[in-house]
Amino acid sequence: MGKKKVIATILVSISMATTLLTGCTSSIRIGNSKKQIVFFSNKIEAVDTYNKLVEKFEAENPDIDVVVSAPPDATTVLKTRLVKGDAPDIISLSADRSFADFVDANILEDLSGKIDFSVIDPIYNQMLKALEIESVDGIYGVPYALNASGVIYNKDIFEELGLSIPKTWDEFLGLAQTVQDNGITPFYFTLKESWTSLPAWNTIASTLVSSDSFKKVNSKETTFNEIYSETTDKIMKLMKYGHSDNFGVGYNDGNTAFANGESAMYLQGSYAIPAILTVNPDLNLGMFPLPASNNEEENKLVSGVDVYFAITKDSKNKEESIRFINFLLEEENAKTYIDEQSAFSAVKGVVQEDSKFEVFDEFFENSRVVDFQDHYYPAELPASDMIQTYLLDGDKNKFLNNFQKEWLKANRQYIKE
């Protein structure tokens, strides 16, 4: 069955914007010689890195000026700009369901044959493609930087207790029990903020549930009661290894507590590490994938596209934008980004050499990676709130039934009759 209404919620605004965009993305000339392109990013923390790369690019390309725009609440600002016909030339966002929305709204340029995709690990091109609810011809996004979720751990505590990195789910639970038996808190949960339930959820669900399951739910071949049953059981088992106030503290509290040695492990993303080290620069920490399966070969690193680039379809500066993106994909420049942002690269041969992430090496080298489960969730789905409630009240059936109901409501334009 074809699309019913491609645009719902945010796409209503975006599809209206496509008619406004024609001729509205200005080609700005500085004096008589330069063109100005606008690079729009949701990474406020990466502005200094981007500006460093822009300075280098402009020195090599004196006919182009690049303006970096990274406002707070970037996605909302971007939607407003699109509706007003003020689209930036380059969009740089995290790859989640919104990418599919932009593709469906027909506001992105097909970059086939324009960007050197041969330098990018194919698995990340596939991740972007998999986000499309109904596959379309063309390539609309350029994967650039990656992050990862898993287990941040205190190496000194592990050494003191003689612990090694677990390879299976049972080993992981056994390790948590050993830590607890020695009077140390295994995990520091921060569930006062519902979104902090997602790192643990993603690391379990992404290993156990295939991304094509969502299309099967839409076509009524399966339900979340079936595909998420094991995930809900396993995430609940972790709660007994938390601290005394799992739902009373938030993310910043957790970063500080872990930095000060109040738990052996912290179920979070790699993005939390800079904040942790700001509190305690001398903390000896590392990170490993959470092994959600008892089949070691099934366990993967949950690592998604944290930064992708796209060019708006009606940009008047496409050639200049293409030059800038290809510049960012050069090995030296991609390495600058991941080193300064504690990230990983989608560019072949660009490796994160920080020893904190050494356990990840074999997973990246063997493409044993899988995207974040919540990257497939529409913005209208209150996933983290539902997970938080489930972890608090323990009502599995209510949670799974509610997840199914909310999913069908948020995806009603794609549901097969």
Image: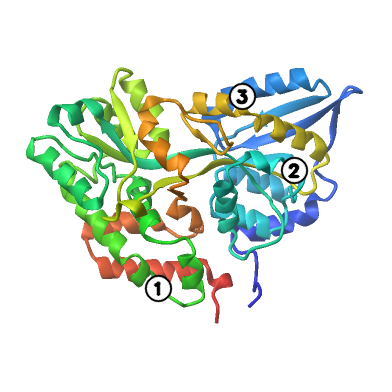
Q: Amino acid at mark 3?
A: Glu
Residue drawn at point x = 55 percent, y = 34 percent: 43
The answer to whether the residues at label 3 and label 1 have Cβ atoms under 8 Å apart is no
Q: Is residue 82 left or right of residue 194?
A: right
**Quadrant housing the N terminus:** bottom right
The disc at residue 332 is: 3
Q: Estimate the spatial distance between the alpha carbons at disc 3 and disc 1, rounded to whole Å.
A: 46 Å
Up the image or down, 93 lies above or below 353; here it is below
- Which corner quadrant holds the C terminus? bottom right
Q: Which mark is residue 223?
A: 1
Q: Return the x and y of residue 238 as percentages of the image width and height.
A: 22, 50
Residue displayed at 45% across by 44% down: 366
Q: Residue at x 39, y 49 (%)?
A: 300
Nearer to us: label 2 or label 3: 3
Look at 50% across and 28% down and name the residue there: 341
Q: Name the residue that disc number 2 marks.
A: 86
* Of labels 3 and 1, the one closer to you: 3
Position in image of residue 67 (x %, y %): 71, 28
User: Which dot marks residue 209?
Assistant: none
